[in-house]
Image (cartoon, rainbow, N blue to C red):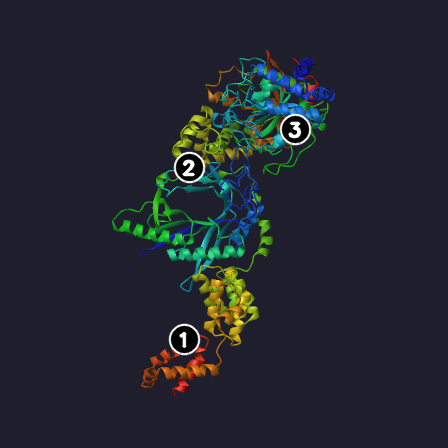
Amino acid sequence: MRQRKRGDISRVPGLFSMNINGMRELFNSGNSVEETIHSTFDKIERSKLNAFITLSKEIALEEARILDKNGAKGMLGGIPIGIKDSISTKGIQTTCGSKILEGYVPPYDAHVIERLKLEGAIIIGKTNMDEFAMGTSTETSYFGPTRNPWDLKRVPGGSSGGSAAAVAGGEAPIALGSDTGGSVRCPASFCGVVGLKPTYGLVSRYGLIAYANSLEQIGPFARNVKDVALLLDVIAGYDSKDSTSINEKCEYLKALRYDVSDVKIGVPKEYFGEGIDEDVEKAVWKGIKTLEDMGASYTEISLKHTKYSLAAYYIIAMSEASSNLARFDGLRYGLRLEKDKDWHNTFSEIKAQGFGEEVKRRILLGTYALSAGYYGKYYLKALKVRTLIKRDFESALKDTSVLITPTMPFPAFKIGEKIGDPLALYLADVNTVPINLAGVPSISVPCGFSGKLPIGMQIIGRHFDEATVLRTAYAFEQGGGCDT
Amino acid sequence: MKDVIIGLEIHIQLNKLRSKLFCSCSTKYHDSEPDTHTCPVCLGLPGTLPVINRKAVDSAIKVALALNCEIEEWTMFYRKNYYYPDLVKGFQISQYDYPIAIDGKINIEIEDVEREIRIKRVHMEEDPGRLIHVGTIDRSRYSLIDYNRSGMALLEVVTEPDLRTPKEARIFLNKLKNILEYLDVFDSSLEGSLRSDANISLAGGARAEIKNISSYKGVEKALLFEIVRQNNLVRRGVKVVQETRHFDEARGVTISLRTKEGEEDYRYFPEQDLVPFTILDRVDDIKKTLPELPDAKRKRFVLKYGISDNHAKVLISELGLANFFEIVATELDAKLSATWIADVLKGELNYRDLDISAFSPDHIIQILQMLEKDKITENGAVQIIRTIMDEGGKPSEIVDRKGLLKIETDASENIVLLVLEENPAAVQDYLGGKEESLHYLMGQVMKKTRGRADPNTVSELLKKKLGC
């Protein structure tokens, strides 16, 4: 019986490229959620992408059966979703891409997971990521690199590489990532999908395993702007468990219009500087012109303090990381030694065995930056730079409604190409980290190709003005922006 | 003695709050199994975030006001980074710059001289879990951890180095505890409710910090030990080094934990998961809830009831005792009440290690009324009090059962005559000029009346019968 139905479903044309609406119509017309989820797992299990660290097949199928019985209600009723492994899921292993958390099963759900469950979404698994979100390529994962669906020899970007690859590769229509310095937008750009980093405070961080807590936000991935807006509608909003959460939510899906006649675009020249690939520059400018053709206006502007943002970002992120990652001592959860030693030797050895190279590098640098005698020189100074960068954005966005830049300076690079040169990898974040320092929202939408590799265009907005960011991205997408 | 300089850091657990500092876990864990009062937040599980308990902030402001501090306009939290098995996150959420309050003072009384002890700052932080060492800290083979305490709200009160002797430190702590009890923010009877670190240096020498002394008396003992230890070092020509020491309460000694070189760098930096918040706007409301504090009560007792300052001092030393006194003093003569409560009742309670709640004010009122009406002697009153404490019962019933009704003068006269008849030798001695014999004869009368006769009456009767 099940076999027959399953056959039916997988013959539905375009099942694995379907958007939320398409899938919901499928369920409304009597198709089985359970069989859809089955087909999805079949596809993932055959996949070469390594987009998932953990599959929650049993739980997902059980949920699906309940929805089939009671009707797939909710904004995301029956829709499969991949969750970045930095987000806590009750009863499903959550490793953050690290050996130190292998086997850790959280006893609680992150706020966003509670929201997703309320709306009927089905969590199919935990997606691969750079260890503790520290990376731009998903190569630092303890569970092996994820591959880019457009070219299996290339990285999907990072750190939310698993989520972006899953969405691009048809393994999930939507996914959640987290973005500390570009970790949603970079893989969205490399994998040719849409990814949004919301304003700091719009989405609750409760349950997100912290890398740099003053910078990061959970953000949605989808294959189109509409689904990103819908997913944001579900996860955004005030949460009393997150003291930095702010009640500034709008209705994002309803804000989408095919109209940018009132949109004033600012184009910051610093973001088109040295190291930007020619194809990328061309594609983004073409995107800006497309929007202009649709009625938007643009001016070239300057964000003066851009050149300090990478330094400030890495000092702040590493400092916070050195403290955030201190709790992993193997005492209460996660990696254990075969034989306990005294306290100092036990926790030292747990960290030595459990953390990878990049994580150790950032903890050491962050510890150094916070040390007595260096705090003022590094951390405090970085905070001051951060304030200047934030002001840059606030003043630029007074006269403009959005800023447009390339998301990444170049398209996806080859696996192994840059991993030996940490500094080169840090430089790849040059266009994404200032946005986290400023706390403003930013989306990456596909805007063209370099050869067969997708290019992403970054649209940045005012604090809590996701509506305009999404509307601009939507109009661009509807205006055929991605065609080359 | 050389100049001794002592400063204290006192950690007060706000255990009267219903929930912990950053989560909604109950604070009533003291009689529970380990790890039963925990949640993902106070266990520091990955991804959890702190949310400030506003009631805890109010309590902190209340204490700061009572310690005459300046309340800051706004406050914020910092992370204090260090590794310890009882610390679930690898850092403690504490305060650094911009604490709740600064610059306060408490007056203490040293041998009837008032001294002002300055309070440097008052700040909030979370309590770590509790380590239980098998045996002593330096010899333990393994340790157990109970995370019930993890995340409890602590208030840290830091004094300026204004204390000069271990005794002063004890008096200061008692005064602080007294104030805190009046404020109803903590229950001092619970384990670990008040823990102190003591800094001490001799004659400008290096400073030793004695960590985590968990009892009031322990502070005085640890400091006394430290003075002897440091004096011995100086006498032998050994330099006193700056170090952190642990007080072994059982052995009454301090042991070195680490020297200055081994001091940790706590890498304080702002806790970004909590936002800075205004507190000054709470001050007026909280001021209105401040109760009468011990010093004010003591003054009022002297003025309103006309009792001695010494009695007032004893009565205000515990809020329960002060309230007890006021109940009794509205029914009876205030001075009589003060004398009996402060001198007799308090003494009998102390002797039995009992609290004032063990005695009913009605009972003392009944006893003192009988005394005022001359129905019982003072001795009889003391016997009733002791009987109630030891065996229970009501005053009137005890008077009947033990036959404590005072003997009338007529009856006393007969007994006096009998005693004089039975003790001719003593009578002769007395008449011969031996004054002490009168005491002997008194004793004999009291013995025969089992203390029920009034001593003054007996004395007068004896003198009269002996013809002087």
The residue where tag 1 is placed is B447
The residue where tag 2 is placed is A373
In which image quadrant can residue A451 be found?
Answer: top right
Position above or below: B178 against A439: below
Chain letter for mark 1: B
Q: Which residue does the image show at 33% across and 52% down from the upper left?
A: B227
Amino acid under disc 3: Leu
Q: Is residue A360 left or right of residue B55?
A: left
Amino acid under disc 2: Gly
Classify mark 2: residues with Cα within 10 Å, few (<14), some (14-19) or many (20+): few
Q: Nearer the viewer, mark 1 or mark 3?
A: 1
Q: Is residue B182 left or right of residue A119?
A: left
Q: CA distance from mark 2 to mark 3?
A: 43 Å
In which image quadrant can residue A342 be found?
Answer: top left
Position above or below: A349 against B134: above
Q: Nearer the viewer, mark 2 or mark 1?
A: 1
Q: Secondary structure at mark 3?
A: helix
Q: Nearer the viewer, mark 2 or mark 3?
A: 3
Viewer-proximal residue, B254 or A333? A333
Q: Given the current orientation, which residue lies at the most extreme right position?
A: A29
Residue A232 image label: 3
